[in-house]
Amino acid sequence: MTMRALDLFCGAGGASMGLHRAGFEVVGVDIKPQPRYPFTFIRGDAMRPPVRLEDFGLIWASPPCQFYSMVSRNTGVADRYPDLVADVRSMLAGRTYIIENVPGAPLVNPVTLCGSMFDLGTETMQLRRHRWFECSELLMVPPCQHDGRLTIGVYGHGTNSWHREKLLAMKRGHGILVSEQREAMGIDWMTRRELSQAVPPAYSEFLASRLPAHPTKA
């Protein structure tokens, strides 16, 4: 039995790919055009979904994270961005849902996933992309598995200064390549900027596969 999943604020489809791999038929909604989104895409306001929520067995939502991010708060620009988590939670009340955001966002009893749990990265660099997830069902997750490799950064503007210094010390002579970011994230269809906003498919596949609403458990 195939069940449908709705990905709100879907971006270029990192979380959607994981939901697909978990066995769901996926529809994505985003207010911006997403020419590389790999599944059925509807352009629209995720806070006023242009679909019926009751038609989906699982709703995934990744509202903008800038209001909650450490970078925005440290630079004093957080208030330029929307604070949507509470409104998203209210909209999804009573449904099977997962809300994703950065550490520090006002999620209720969130679980943390890290790329190290899924051996994401490259031969020389490890992805430690920590993200929080509020789930309508209680889910257990493994601990981080950080190792001695350099952490790979996935940013829209390339490689930050801290990583550049590390890379120079390793005599690499260049910053993080977009091909390396794609390999680390397990995403081969996105631009660097799209990768910077993406959820690794391994995260959403892991969580969706453990929900009672998963197709194999229906």
Image (cartoon, rainbow, N blue to C red):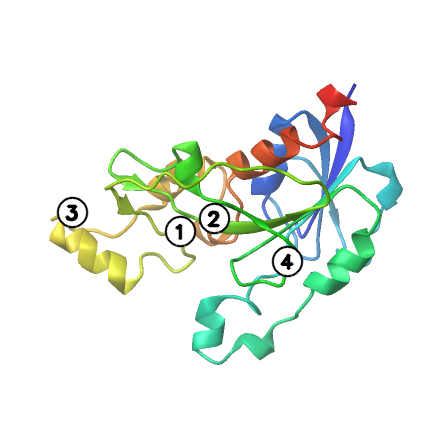
Q: Name the residue beneath numbered marker 2.
A: 195
Instruction: Name the kind of residue labelled 1 in the image.
Output: Val
Lateral position of residue 78 relative to residue 215, left or right: left
What whole-number distance in Å separates the C-alpha atoms at marks 4 and 3? Answer: 39 Å
Tell me where residue 132 appears, x and y as whole percent.
Answer: 55, 51
Tell me where residue 185 appears, x and y as whole percent.
Answer: 44, 40
Q: Name the residue beneath numbered marker 3.
A: 172
Category of crowding for the residue at label 2, using alpha-carbon neighbours closer than 10 angstroms: few (below 14), some (14–19), many (at least 20): many
- Do the residues bearing badges 4 and 2 touch, measured as CB atoms within 8 Å? no
The answer to whether residue 47 of the structure is visible from this angle is no
Q: Earlier in the sequence, mark 2 or mark 3?
A: 3
SS class, disc 3: loop
What whole-number distance in Å separates the C-alpha atoms at marks 4 and 2? Answer: 23 Å
Category of crowding for the residue at label 4, using alpha-carbon neighbours closer than 10 angstroms: few (below 14), some (14–19), many (at least 20): some
Lateral position of residue 48 relative to residue 25, left or right: right
Q: Where is the N terminus found, in terms of image quarters? A: top right
Lateral position of residue 91 relative to residue 35, left or right: right
SS class, disc 2: helix
- Do the residues bearing badges 1 and 2 touch, measured as CB atoms within 8 Å? yes
Q: Nearer the viewer, mark 4 or mark 1?
A: 4
Instruction: Name the kind of residue labelled 4 in the image.
Output: Leu
Q: Is residue 206 above or below residue 172?
A: above
Q: Earlier in the sequence, mark 3 or mark 1?
A: 1
Q: Name the residue beneath numbered marker 1.
A: 154
What whole-number distance in Å separates the C-alpha atoms at marks 1 and 2? Answer: 7 Å
Question: In front: 203, or 187?
Answer: 203
Q: Name the residue beneath numbered marker 4.
A: 107
Q: Earlier in the sequence, mark 1 or mark 2?
A: 1
Residue at x 25% of width, y 42% of height: 149
